[in-house]
Amino acid sequence: MVSRAAIRATAASFWSSAGGRHFFGLPIDLERAVVRTLPLAVHRISNLSTEVVSEFLRHLRVEEFETGTARDLRGCLVADVGVGLVLIEADDPTDEQRLTLAHEVAHFLLHYLIPRNRAIVALGTRITPMLDRTRAATKSELFSSALRAVPIAPYRHAMLRNASGTFGEAGVIEAEADEMALELLAPHDLVHTGTGDVAGIASRFGIPLNAAARLVTASDGSVTTIGVQALFGIR
């Protein structure tokens, strides 16, 4: 599980690598920062769904992953061999697309690139072919990864949902991506909390009202949340 401090540090590190938030306007032009900073491409598709993603991957001759029951999507991340592709619902409003991109970027950093780089640093570049699934892990690598608490299992995007449509085991990483998405777009240190001005926050940072509601701090210091399922349930 990724701590709140680590999430904020990761978001800050991204903006530092991009050259600073001030170069990308307000509301932030996250896509411009992403494509110049990360090995990520962004592609928009109308009527995005799990079925459309599967067909898109077949067209690219990319190995498919399990998507479960067919459902609509706001966005999807496909990551492999150190690079990634973000698919976004093209017909969503601009603020929703910005939030979707931030959510998928958070997945790429927190749940793919950082763990991958950690494994390479800990176990050496010889582990790269195993991470890319061109060979199986050796017993020595499995032992070393366990000893150092460095996971080396291939990345799989958490597309599956329970029969009720909830996240199930994927809930933890979805909550982490949720929190980092907001930190990328509206950093804690820049949000004027305590005023209850949800509409003002949404307008200033270019995010949907329901996302801005999460950034409003109550008088007792607790953060108002509306639940991960409501905010990112179909991303």
Image (cartoon, rainbow, N blue to C red):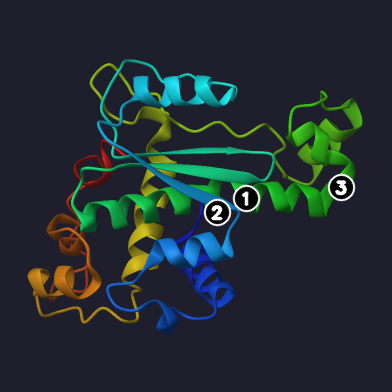
Q: CA distance from mark 1 to mark 2?
A: 5 Å
Q: Mark 3 belongs to which amino acid?
A: Thr
In the rendered view, tell whether residue 76 sits above or below residue 50: below
Task: Name the residue that disc number 2 marks.
Answer: 109
Which type of secondary structure does the marked residue at label 2 adopt?
Answer: helix
Q: How far from the left and from the top, in percent, is residue 175? A: 36, 47
Q: Residues within 10 Å of mark 2 (few under 14, many from 20)?
A: some
Residue plotted at (81% across, 42% down):
147
Q: Which residue is denoted by mark 3 in the rendering?
A: 125
Which residue lies at the image location 27% right of the left edge and 23% below the top edge? Answer: 71
Numbered mark located on residue 10 in the image: none
Residue at the spot 61% in from the left edge and 34% down from the top edge: 155
Residue 206 occupies quadrant:
bottom left
Measured from the top left, where is residue 96 in percent x and y? 23, 52
Q: Nearer the viewer, residue 54 or 154?
A: 54
| SS at badge 3 | helix
Confirm or deny contact between disc 1 and disc 2 (CB under 8 A).
Answer: yes
Point out which mark residue 113 bears.
Answer: 1
- The image quarter in which residue 81 lies: top right
Q: CA distance from mark 1 to mark 3?
A: 14 Å
